[in-house]
Image (cartoon, rainbow, N blue to C red):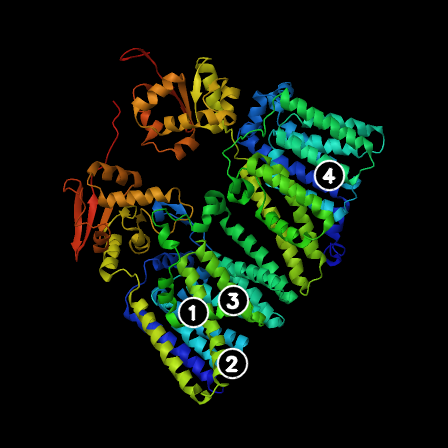
Amino acid sequence: MSQDLIKNNKIFQTLIQKQEIVLLLLLIVILLVPLASNFFHQKPLLMGSESYYHLLYEPLSFLLSRIPFSFLFTVPLVLGLVSLLLLFLLARRFNLPPNYSFFFLLFLIFTPAFMYSFSTISAYSFFFFLVLAGFVLLTTQNNIKYLSVIPFIFATFIDIVSAGLLLLLQLLYLWHHKKEKHLTVSLGVTLLSLLYALFFRKIPLALGPFHAEHVALDLVSDLGGLSGIGFILLLLTLIGVGILWRKKEFRVVYLLLFSTILMYLYSTETVLFLATTVVFLAVCGLIALFEQSWNLPTLKRFTFLLILLSVLFSALTYLNRIADLPPAAGDTQALLWMKENTPAEAVVFSAVENGYFIPYFAQREPFQEFHNQAATTGLAGTIMNSTYITTTFPLLEKHNIAYFYITPAMKKQFSADQGLLFLFSNERFKLVYSSQGYEVWEFRAYNSPGEIS
Amino acid sequence: MENSRWLIWLIFGITVGTRLLLAFTTPNFTYDSYFYLRQVEHVTNTGLPLYHDSLSYGGRDITYLPFFYYFMAFFDLFLPLELAAKIIPNILFASLTLIVYFISTKITKNQLAALFSTLIAGFLPILFTPNSFTALSLFLPLVFLNIYAFLSLNEKFHLSLYLLTFLLLCLTSAATFLLVFGQGLYLFLAYLERKKIDPSEREVIVFSLFFYIWSQFLFFKNSFITEGISFIWGNVPPQIIAQYFPKLSLIQAIFLVSVIPFVIGVYIVYRSLFQSKNIKTFFLISLVVSTTLLAWMRLIEFTLSLAFFSIILAILFSLFYQESIQYLERTKIAHYSQWYTLGLIILLGISTIYPSITHALNQDIPTPDELDVFAWLRDNTKPTAGVLALLEQGHLVTYLSQRRNLMDDNFGLIENPGQRMEDLGILYTTPFQTEALSLLDQYDLNYLVLTPRALEKYNLKKFKYTTPDCFRRIYDEKGIRIYQVRCSLRRVLL
């Protein structure tokens, strides 16, 4: 980094020298802010659809079911902190210059994809941690390096795309360290583990989705997506790619970038991997931009400050939004009521976004969940949008839908004058719960023609 | 040329004079101007922008860049607002003649050639809207002042001027994106053409890019989050988006830019893009290309793109004149060069001045009767009343009547404007009273305004659902009617 920006600046010098403490503290603050907000708003501390998916389904449910619900929020927090520590270790092992490691880790923890992944229970955050742990062990000089196979094996049990990424990383590492034979062993074990997971455990191609995917919105967090990357970092990445295009030593990174882009296009849930690669290129771009001497040094300082402010601003804006992740306090109250006051075998219809909260809190079967929505999307759309009882009622009876869970978000999305919300005025629907805009409606079956049970 | 200084001021004076004459002889402002009038009035009265408007759409948040409003509020302190709103924007538009002269002189070093550009810039039809009071009147002069400063960045004064104007641009209009994109394209094309760019220009462009992004995120973060990528299109309802972002129409472009500057400008761009050795010209051509690209991709409003495009073509005309005169002077008919110049002046005069004045006379302006009606509403209805009016009349409802409207053409941060647009159409055209009353209840509207414009737009003779028991006609003059809503739908629970 150009000397006039860093060397003569005591603040930057201090920050870089004490980057471990500074960044750890920063990460703790970032991860605690949404938790604190949830606590004060009496929302569950554990946020996000994917968190509840993993509480219900393998492979993580086995592990997570051992932890009391009130402590589950510590899982992503601990994973985040440990991952950061592992990143510090790796940066040292790979002899990354201190300014590179500082800005890379700073921008990474400010990236919404990272914030989201380590504020919720996310399979890819586990994967991230396992891969980092594996490479830290792999790069150890003594026999502990053979223990790296353990985290690598676990990392192959999530899905095929992440396992493929792990294999790619190992291959690239092997390419640069051809003389280290244990790497071949590690790669071989990983491959065998993947084959086992693929054929015997039937892992999916990509886990999820856990939200309604949109390629553009999910990429740029500033456009309101669930997570993603800040626009400024994407711009810096373009600058980075443009500046470093001809440098051979960065070809590895371009291969990773290409792979993570393909993964992202297939499933936007993999944005964390793309974000990590993008942040690295962005930092390279940033440093290359400011390593050059400028004719206008004052402008140089202002531009650098602007970039930092923009990244910070983007992160703060996202941090403000992340606390709004479901479930809300009203969700848990309504669903817990449902657990106590509805039959255990009842099927509950709601928006697919609520698909994991219903089985977890209400312990009832939801009509649709994200991971199986392909089978139910068409039907769900018909039920939500049809205004004709001759269309809707047979579907409800056929699928044994007895209850409807309606949230304020659904009321905003669907008009009360048409579709299902309009049909609620029919005598066969009864409002059995209503609080703070959250409603539970019962659909009554006929005992005999004309008679409602 | 010694006389050029007084000629510039003469052209400036004629431009200002013509614009002011038309502004004051044509009553009132264009429909969209009333939004700006209201905002400036609020800034003058409270010192703050009106970011939460309780009247527009029945109550909504707005976000906009505030500099133009504060700029005009300053003049509102000394002059009546509507007087300042007629004078200042016309002076600002006319100032383009001076800025264009300086830019043209810089690229051609030929004052006579620059005078031609000045003349064209003064009478571009697309800009000849003397009754329009919008931020564009400040934005365009600032942009071209910024471009002028960019062309001489190695001088300290110009660097300071660039930074100041860029800061003001970022606080005036998000359309500064045109400039930033143009600068980016300039770097890209220069790289392709292997042209050497001054390092100061590169640095300034990088700074401008990041400053622009940061400043726009500061103001519009909620819009980005709420509207996502459709923020680019201003959340315009799908029913009318083609009006704001139409397909490029060559005929319309020729008419609004005027034929000679358009044809010659396009020729100069085409010829110079790959041949020009002058880096300053190359920059201007990059701006033309970028504007065309953005308009073609329908990422910016057509009128804005045409306005920007036409001024640059006016500047590039000076290049054409210079080259044509130099060519002529090498031929056997060199002694006809003065006649050539004179002929060009006459041709330009005919092809620009007449279309400009025609365009000015055809501005979309409410009639005095319409204004009287909306003023009447202010004096004869409760302050909390809601009024149904056409989309374009929405700002008249809020500014003149000071009542709630159903909708206006400021669509940012509005949920489902398409549905509102549809409901507005239904309220004018439905034959069913129940349907109308349901919508009137939903939007809490108490008065319906039916103007000749509405009758023409919806091909009506009157509202089809108004009956005396539910709709009392309280105003009926000069073809304009106002109905008071006296009925309501209620749900009865059995």
Residue position for label 2: B110
Judge depth for marks 2 and 1 and give the one in front: 2
Residue position for label 4: A172
Chain that bears disc 4? A
Q: Of B290 and A55, which appears nearest the observer? A: B290
Chain that bears disc 2? B
Q: Quadrant of residue A181?
A: top right
**Amino acid type of the residue that numbered disc 3 sits on in the rendered structure:** Ile
Judge depth for marks 4 and 2 and give the one in front: 4
Q: Position of residue A220 (x, y in %)?
A: 55, 44
Q: How far apart in space, not on screen, are marks 3 and 4 (Cα)?
A: 45 Å
Residue position for label 3: B285
Judge depth for marks 3 and 4 and give the one in front: 4
* Residue at disc 1, secondary structure: helix
Q: Report the disc number at residue B92.
A: 1
**B413 with respect to B189 (left or right):** left
Q: Outermost residue, top direction?
A: A448
Please say if the residues under marks 3 and 2 sit with CB atoms less than 8 Å apart: no
